[in-house]
Image (tube, coloured by chain):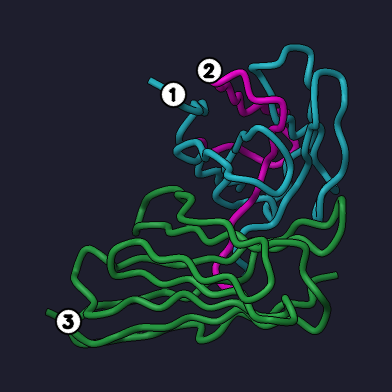
Chain colours: A cyan, B green
Amino acid sequence: EAQVTQNPRYLITVTGKKLTVTCSQNMNHEYMSWYRQDPGLGLRQIYYSMNVEVTDKGDVPEGYKVSRKEKRNFPLILESPSPNQTSLYFCASSWGRGIEQYFGPGTRLTVT
Amino acid sequence: GQQVMQIPQYQHVQEGEDFTTYCNSSTTLSNIQWYKQRPGGHPVFLIQLVKSGEVKKQKRLTFQFGEAKKNSSLHITATQTTDVGTYFCEYQTGANNLFFGTGTRLTVIP
């Protein structure tokens, strides 16, 4: 089954404790991206990757890091999480930028 | 920054009534995509519009892209409770500028 998986689905952590949210897709998509969703603000792109070893900043990259060492994986790293990073995070993949994206189930992160 | 307004933010309709959400831009868009997100779910792709004046239909859903490629609409005829969710437009203004609208949350009253 074609899918995008994210782990964990829920995470409660404390300020400053490094965390990684994993994202994996099995569709051989070249393009992957991370979004955060906050009430009233819609989906805002954090980082995207056009291909392996190619990453770029989206709309709200501050406080986040990503890597793309393999085509299927695109982890999101929060080196020192802060409460304003409490949000719902989605990973997505597609054949290219600006075309149909497949979203993962989401990761709800709470930073206290 | 973002130049597209998505309206309305919320819409409550009686089951059977029609529903329309709009994305309006101050600049020409390269293309526009529409997504639906059910409560507690993730966005799911509905359609892509690329050509000026394009109209596409999916059963009760009609998608339009304006002649000037500055606005788009999603119209649902005779809403059903299964239509509940938030509808987002995703738009591209250039090669690297890709954004989502703020969404329209649809509530259908049985």
- Same chain shared by disc 3 and disc 2: no
Q: Secondary structure at mark 2?
A: loop
The quarter of the displayed image where residue A95 is located: top right
Q: Secondary structure at mark 3?
A: loop
Which residue corresponds to mark 1? A2
Give the residue type at disc 2.
Asn
Instruction: Tell me which residue sits at (79%, 32%) in the image.
Output: A49
Which residue corresponds to mark 2? A26
Instruction: Tell me which residue sits at (22%, 63%) in the image.
Output: B82
Which residue corresponds to mark 3? B15
Which one is in front, A95 or A43?
A95
Above/below status of A26 relative to B19: above
Q: Which residues are magenta?
A: A11-40
Above/below status of A69 relative to B32: above
CA–CA distance in space, label 3 to label 2:
38 Å
**Residue A8 rendering spot, x and y as whole percentages:** 50, 28
Above/below status of A99 relative to B77: above
